[in-house]
Image: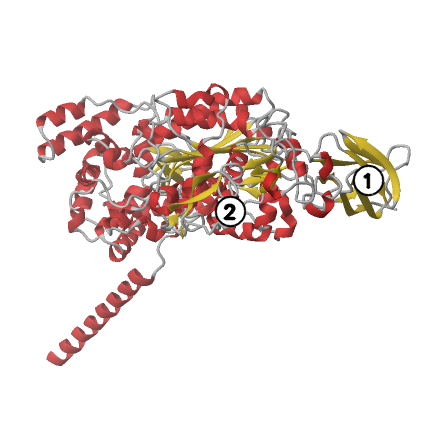
Amino acid sequence: MRSKFSVGFNKIFCTLFFIACVVLLALQFFPLPSSLTKTPYANLLLARDGSLLGAGIAADQQWRFAPVESLPDKYKKSLLLFEDQHFYRHPGINPLAIARALQGNLQAGKVTSGGSTISMQLARLLRQAEYQQQDKKLPARSIISKLLEAGRAFQLEWRFSKEELLIHYASHAPFGGNIVGLRAAAWRYFGRAPEHLSWAESALLAVLPNSPALIHPGRQRDLLKQKRDRLLVRMHQENYFSDLDLQLALIEPLPERPQSLPQLVPHLLATLKKQHSAQHIFHSSIDPFIQRITAQVAERHGLRLANEGVNNIALILIDHERMETLAYVGNQAWQKQQRYAPDLDLIQRPRSTGSILKPLLYGLMLQEGELAPTSLIPDIPTQFGGYSPKNYDRSFRGAVPAQFALAHSLNIPSVRMLRDYGIGKFQEKLQAMGMTTLFRPADDYGLTLILGGAEGTLWDLTGIYARLAASARDGNISQPIPTLLLQDKKALENKILLQEKTPSIKPVIQQGAAWLTLQALIDVARPGNDNYWRDFSGSQTIAWKTGTSYGLRDAWAIGSNGRYTLGVWVGNAGGEPASFISGQSSAAPILFDVFDALPSINWFAKPAHALKTISVCKDDGYLTGGQCEAVDMEIPNTSHFAKVTQNHRRIHLDTDEQFRVHSRCETVNNMQAHNWFVLPPTQEFYWRQHHSEYQSLPPWRSDCLKDLLQVDEDQPIELVYPNEESRIYIPMDLDGKRSRVVLKAVHRNPAAQLYWHLDDEFLGETKIFHEREAALEPGVHKLLVVDKQGYRLERRFRVIGKE
């Protein structure tokens, strides 16, 4: 008997053990519902203070946000007390609750309670979601469905912790209409995050999934309020809150309807979705107050610009102290019509840069000793091959200080500076600064690179200017690329620095050159009445630059004060030109209106340690060489500026100091030596038109003209056109004949007479205005110009064109 009993017991034990193993294997390895991992979530964009900036609906048209990291205490207590008080003490099903529900249903004669635990409810929600994903209808509830839910509840309890189960339930629970999950319900009904809900709001969201349709007007909302209030009373009885809290909670009204979610930064949300496709909640660095201000300014200027044929505005504000983006107006499209592409994020779109790169070239040349701030740069008619740049005002000044050329955005001096610096070298520096759109070879851009021949994004360029301001203030430390997102909570708890998570860029333009560059930009003339800003004590210092693209398609304004860097772009998203568009009149007013709306910030102190003082000529800004009146000039301490003036000459005058003389016509004792500021003839010709104080070289005394060529090294003749690098293309007229070319020269003596020879044939003579027309065929030509004293200038040039 004992052996038979022992054998029977062993069989039962083995059978039970086998069943247990099968159950455990099933719990561990049976696939979980796909709705746990394949649930589509809506995107949520939060401001730096946690307020909502915008949201986008999920792919299945449900307002379902990503699960909360942890359940708020108020909601958690409300949920457990209402749904499952023994949640932490059962393995997924609660036999006592099922028995109690069965007894109540029998007494009532109908189903009044199902006895489901939170785990079982989660199982049902997941099963329902799976059917919806397959476009199938969930079968009617039955004993079999209950058993399936119970089995799934066991599995969920086995695979997840209790806290994880609560989060899964709260993230899949229905809250009326197409609102799913606690986070979406909190924002849609109450306009704030779940952790900021009151006791009454938490209680409402705890009872709502039980009857989600009751939230809608006309659906027995009084019944919903009674359910909430009963739960509040029970929580008070559990000593969750005081008598006063209960009284206040009971008088809180139910929300009328789901709130419309704000859309303050729609383009930023769309951009972040593309950049971080696996992320659904974005904690941005946007300041909601500043965002509203900048959006209002952009909207206000929209009508003004629309009247000028400009329909799109983009704007970005960066705190260059923290390198955080505070405002992001991706596209303020006039009237939001589809033909103005209102959904396009123009901050991230490459556009022609216009003149916005000029300060960067200036800063690089300062830093590398190519020029000093007051060094004269030629501003004369210029041709490089077939390229002939023009100033915006179509005038010439002869020569201008480098900082003046930058402040007035003169094109010809900038092109000459780029020619001297090197196109390829400048492109490499721009890429090192963070300009990501220069993907073509340098020769493809050519000298037009400095005038808008390349494309850049407002994001890149404003970031570059922000780092320029940061370098001027903080020194030569690496600066991060401006961030759009704040660190997550875990990073903050672990004290991970933002710089360790964000790519950093070592300053290309270091502190001394950065500060001097910004000083030059402070002097840029402001639009309208703002030109008198220095006269007002409350006006803040702003270093800024504008740009207008070729063809009048893009207008830029980027500026920095002591704390913020603001970038503005205006134009048409489709690239249509606008007759009156310019950086000065179109974009700059927006920039200054935004700065005026922000707190006034003091300009940062001069970094004396990053500068050094040199002695330069007062007239032309080059090293003195002992030939001029000297002034002190600050340059970057990294600069090895070594260019000595070539615009000052030692001349000799007669005793009356009226005429120039030389040793073959006057004794040395009777000569008066003077240092004289002399520009090359072409520069002098245009310089005199703007500088009445300029003194040309005195004339030679008549008896000194005979041997002049043997003693005078000056070349008084200069060809304006063609110059040394000209390649001339001559189009055909309508009659089939080639157009005629106008050859132009200048002479240091306004009264000089010039004799012209082309290809060894005499063209004629000119006085005062030295211009001659000529008919030229393709090929190489030789031009010779001679004056009465025998000074001669010969130049070869090429005419290109179809034979």
Q: Is residue 671 visible?
A: no
Q: Residues within 10 Å of mark 1 (few under 14, many from 20)?
A: some
Secondary-structure class at tag 1: loop
Instruction: Specify the quadrant of the image occupied by residue 235.
Output: top left
Is residue 730 shown left or right of residue 505? right
**Left or right: 408 as drawn, with respect to 252:** right
Residue identifier under label 1 = 730
Q: Mark 2 points at which residue?
A: 625
Instruction: Categorize mark 2 by other alpha carbons within 10 Å: few (<14), some (14-19), many (20+).
Output: some
Inspect the image, locate mark 2, and give the three-letter code of the amino acid beneath it: Gly
| Mark 2 / mark 1, whichever is N-terminal | 2
Q: Position of residue 470 (x, y in %)?
A: 38, 42
Where is residue 313? Give x, y as percent: 51, 29
Q: Nearer the viewer, residue 34 or 317?
A: 317
Observer-nearest of 329 and 527: 527
Residue 708 on image: x %, y %: 72, 43
What residue appears at the point 26 percent right and 67 percent down from the top-left corner? 21
Cα distance between the residues tagged 2 and 1: 45 Å
Task: Give the left or right position of residue 739, taking residue 396 as reference.
Answer: right
